[in-house]
Image (cartoon, grey):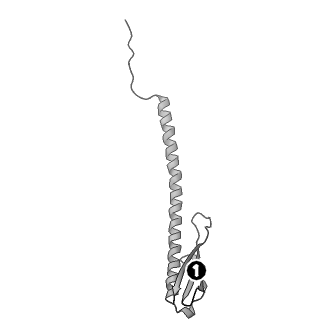
Amino acid sequence: MTKRRRSHSGFTVVEVLVAIVIMALGVLGLAGTASSVSRLIGGGAQQTLAANVAMSRFEQLRSTACASMAAGTATTRGMTEHWTVTASGTSLYTATDTVKYKSAGGRRPAPLVFTSFVKC
């Protein structure tokens, strides 16, 4: 009489261990990416706030009489800004606003420089 081999369906221990290792590497990769994305989103929010501070300064300069426009420094919403106003023609002035902000990660980013023109 010939013995028949029964076929066993299922996974071996080695296959399960390999699958667990691959899954763990994927989860670790996702966790690292998630922290990077979170940091970038926070930096983007700070840069948006800096752009809004500069835009507000430009609007304030536009509402000022041309003879009284001057350079200055201020701290607005936790951001330090320094602006300059230079004549670019007979009735045109160039306003440059440099905004510095603190990053959440402790690294100090380069200051953001915004430029706009004011017509008198």
Q: Secondary structure at mark 1?
A: strand
In the image, 63 versus 94, the foreground residue is 94
Toward the top, the furthest residue is 1
* Rendered location of residue 4, percent (x, y): 38, 13
Give the residue drawn at x 57%, y 65%. 104
In the image, 11 versus 60, the foreground residue is 60
Residue at the disc numbered 1: 96
Q: Residues within 10 Å of mark 1 (few under 14, many from 20)?
A: many
Which quarter of the picture shows residue 95? bottom right
Give the residue drawn at x 46%, y 28%. 12
Give the quadrant of the N terminus: top left
Relative height, residue 21 to residue 88 (above, below): above
In the image, 1 versus 70, the foreground residue is 70
* Rendered location of residue 2, percent (x, y): 38, 8
How many marks can you see? 1
Q: Is residue 44 left or right of residue 5?
A: right
* Rendered location of residue 98, percent (x, y): 59, 77
Give the residue drawn at x 54%, y 90%. 91
| Residue type at tag 1 | Thr
* Rendered location of residue 112, percent (x, y): 58, 72
Relative height, residue 50 to residue 67 (above, below): above
Give the residue drawn at x 56%, y 90%. 90
